[in-house]
Image (cartoon, helix red, strand yellow):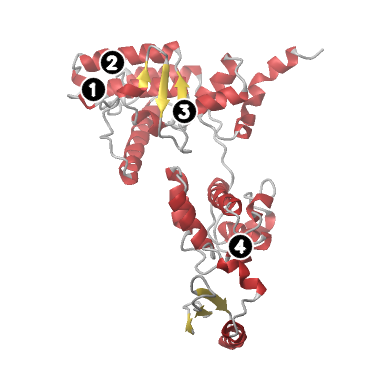
């Protein structure tokens, strides 16, 4: 039996059911009703005879469509919150799209659509492609015949960069093509000193008052920890006191952006900053507004909730608060996340650690990302030449 309906787009969708032959209802889409009627009529004749056409053999797998693959992957694999968010946004994008139709042409068409229709930033395009590529990798490893190879892995370098043709198509819509923004902002020595003065409560020049510094000791410690450890903001403000091991000079992170656990070594500066912060909290410093370590939490902003909206709200508020601090210090284009870049840069400048060792500290899952820091050791490489 089959049913059909015309979609709002004008295409025709057919649903074919055959118990014992098809593992689940088969969805097919055609541009015209005549084309659909003719194809489905031939298909039903073959199914009635107990014959499954070769091009539908792959559909015996539970993973028939792209949506099936995404949902199954998200159910069976533990994923970081970032991938979950990206894949959830993709679930309804290709309703009924069979995995057997996912080829390089399909991939190119999707990337082109993200640029010319959605006008996404190159970094956002890479995030979406990366999340779906990891999903398809899992599908291929599962052995399903629906997807033998992952065409997303065939994309060339700079696939997310807008070409001249992409730019023309975007400008025709009175929009501007997006450029790749690489955050290479370093914190100058004078800027760091200025930020510390603002965090100490000093009034900025040419202003009647400075930014609000709610839980000021915690703000100071968060700044120090970010600058010394290269941890992400959320990784830091969700730390429990039990994860901070002064004796071993480490912080154990069990929840990270990429889903993996890691042990972060602490510098003597970070440990000293922690001791100062701990003493203020234990002494019930008035600026901490009653916060204590009784709950086991290291910072006052987080109540232990893992709700994504709650965490996102905290991140936005803290980012905004530090944005005002940096602006008051005269470095308004500096973002809190730039502390991670600054801290990573200092690891390259001040240590002889390898890329792999630094990646274990920073939590970068791909050491290729760290290639951008290689120029910081140009003098070290020169010393090895004859």
Residue 96: x, y in percent?
Answer: 52, 69
Residue 114 sits above or below residue 352 on the image: below
Q: CA distance from mark 3 to mark 1?
A: 23 Å
- Tell me the quarter of the picture where residue 114 sits: bottom right
Sequence order check, earlier mark of 4 and 2: 4
Q: Which mark is residue 293?
A: 1
Residues marked 4 and 2 touching at CB (< 8 Å)? no
**Residue picked out by circle 3:** 262
**Residue picked out by circle 4:** 146
Left or right of 213? Residue 156 is right
Q: Secondary structure at mark 3?
A: strand
**Residue picked out by circle 2:** 278
Residue 15 sits above or below residue 104 on the image: below
- Tell me the quarter of the picture where residue 235 sits: top left
Left or right of 259? Residue 154 is right
Which mark is in front, 4 or 2? Answer: 4
Q: Nearer the viewer, residue 303 or 186?
A: 303
Residue 228: x, y in percent?
Answer: 45, 19
Which mark is in front, 4 or 1? Answer: 4
Residues marked 1 and 2 touching at CB (< 8 Å)? yes
Q: Residue at x 60, y 57 (%)?
A: 111
Residue 134: x, y in percent?
Answer: 56, 48
Q: Secondary structure at mark 4?
A: loop
Q: Secondary structure at mark 1?
A: helix
Q: Secondary structure at mark 2?
A: helix
Q: Nearer the viewer, residue 347 or 35?
A: 35
Q: Which mark is residue 52?
A: none
Residue 337: x, y in percent?
Answer: 45, 32
Q: CA distance from mark 4 to mark 1?
A: 53 Å
Residue 70 sits above or below residue 333 on the image: below
Which mark is in front, 1 or 2? Answer: 1
């Amino acid at each position: 039996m089959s049913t059909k309906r015309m979609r709002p787009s004008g295409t025709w969708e057919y649903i074919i059911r055959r118990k014992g032959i098809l593992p689940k209802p088969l969805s097919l889409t055609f541009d015209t009703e005549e084309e659909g009627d003719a194809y489905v009529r031939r298909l039903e004749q073959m199914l009635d005879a107990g014959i499954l056409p070769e091009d539908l053999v792959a559909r015996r797998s539970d993973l028939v469509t792209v949506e099936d693959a995404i949902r199954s992957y998200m159910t069976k694999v533990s994923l970081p919150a970032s991938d979950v968010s990206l894949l959830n946004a993709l679930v309804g994008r290709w309703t009924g799209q069979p995995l057997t139709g996912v080829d390089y042409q399909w991939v190119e068409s999707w990337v082109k659509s993200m640029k010319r229709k959605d006008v996404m930033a190159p970094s956002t395009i890479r995030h979406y492609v990366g999340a779906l590529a990891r999903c398809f990798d899992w599908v291929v490893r599962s052995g399903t015949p629906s997807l033998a190879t992952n065409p997303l892995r065939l994309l060339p370098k700079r696939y997310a960069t807008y070409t001249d043709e992409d730019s023309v198509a975007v400008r025709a819509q009175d929009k501007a093509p997006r450029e790749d923004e690489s955050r290479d902002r370093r914190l100058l020595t004078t800027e760091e000193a200025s930020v510390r003065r603002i965090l100490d409560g000093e009034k900025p020049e040419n202003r009647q008052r400075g930014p609000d510094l709610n839980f000021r000791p915690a703000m100071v410690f968060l700044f120090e920890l970010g600058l010394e450890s290269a941890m992400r903001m959320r990784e830091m403000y969700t730390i429990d006191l039990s994860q901070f091991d002064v004796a071993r000079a480490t912080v154990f992170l069990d929840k990270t952006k990429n889903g993996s656990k890691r042990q972060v070594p602490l510098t003597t500066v970070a440990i000293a900053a922690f001791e100062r912060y701990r003493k203020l909290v234990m002494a019930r410093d008035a600026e901490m507004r009653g916060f204590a370590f009784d709950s086991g939490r290291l910072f006052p902003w987080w109540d232990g909730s893992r709700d994504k909206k709650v965490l996102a709200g905290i991140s936005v508020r803290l980012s905004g608060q530090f944005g005002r601090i940096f602006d008051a210090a005269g470095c308004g284009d500096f973002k809190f996340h730039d502390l991670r870049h600054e801290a990573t840069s200092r690891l390259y400048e001040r240590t002889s650690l390898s890329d792999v060792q630094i990646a274990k500290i920073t939590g970068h899952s791909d050491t290729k990302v760290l290639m951008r820091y290689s120029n910081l050791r140009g003098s070290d490489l020169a010393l090895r030449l004859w």
